[in-house]
Image (tube, helix red, strand yellow):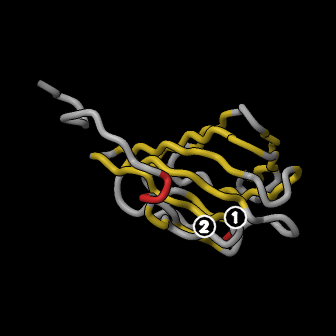
Amino acid sequence: MSTGLFTEIGYVKAGELEEGPLTPGQVRKKALEAGELWVGQCHVTALDAPSQWHHHKEFDSVMFMLSGRIRVDYGEHGEKSFEIGKGDYAYFPRRAIHRCQILEGGDDVHYVFVRVGQGETVVNYDGPGAYAPD
């Protein structure tokens, strides 16, 4: 008998993914949601300009890069950044405002993410200075 999130083994086929919350420059799809767990994938389209600034509200998130290379900008004024590529992981605490931009990979930049939390999964902002915690 299961005492966890799942009661039986299951699967989600690629064609069954649901459109996820949109951030300009990032197209997300949800694979599953169970309790506080939210799992999906993202196709990064921010090639000529960074994606919109956003955070994941009450969700802690982990991402795993499947292809391409991106720069992630973050920090109180957007002054910090790091680069990640295929095979790399990154993690984001709740309400950590950030954005990304493609560095390599053209139209083939994808990552998988796992989130733990509750409520809305994405809140978009005009910039890091526009963020005001609730």
| Residue position for label 1 | 128
Q: Nearer the viewer, residue 2 or 80?
A: 2
Residue 125 in percent (x, y) is at 63, 72
* Vertical order, 131 against 66 (above or below): below
* Vertical order, 62 against 103 (above or below): above
Residue placed furthest toward the top: 1
Residue located at (66% from left, 58% from top): 43
Q: Nearer the viewer, residue 23 or 29?
A: 29
Secondary structure of the residue carrying numbered label 2? loop
* Vertical order, 2 against 30 (above or below): above
What type is the residue that disc 2 sits on? Answer: Tyr
Q: Is residue 126 left or right of residue 29?
A: right
Secondary structure of the residue carrying numbered label 1? helix
- Tag 1 near tag 2, CB within 8 Å: yes
Residue 105 in percent (x, y) is at 84, 51
What type is the residue that disc 1 sits on? Answer: Pro
Residue located at (44% from left, 63% from top): 18
Residue located at (35% from left, 53% from top): 118
| Residue position for label 2 | 131
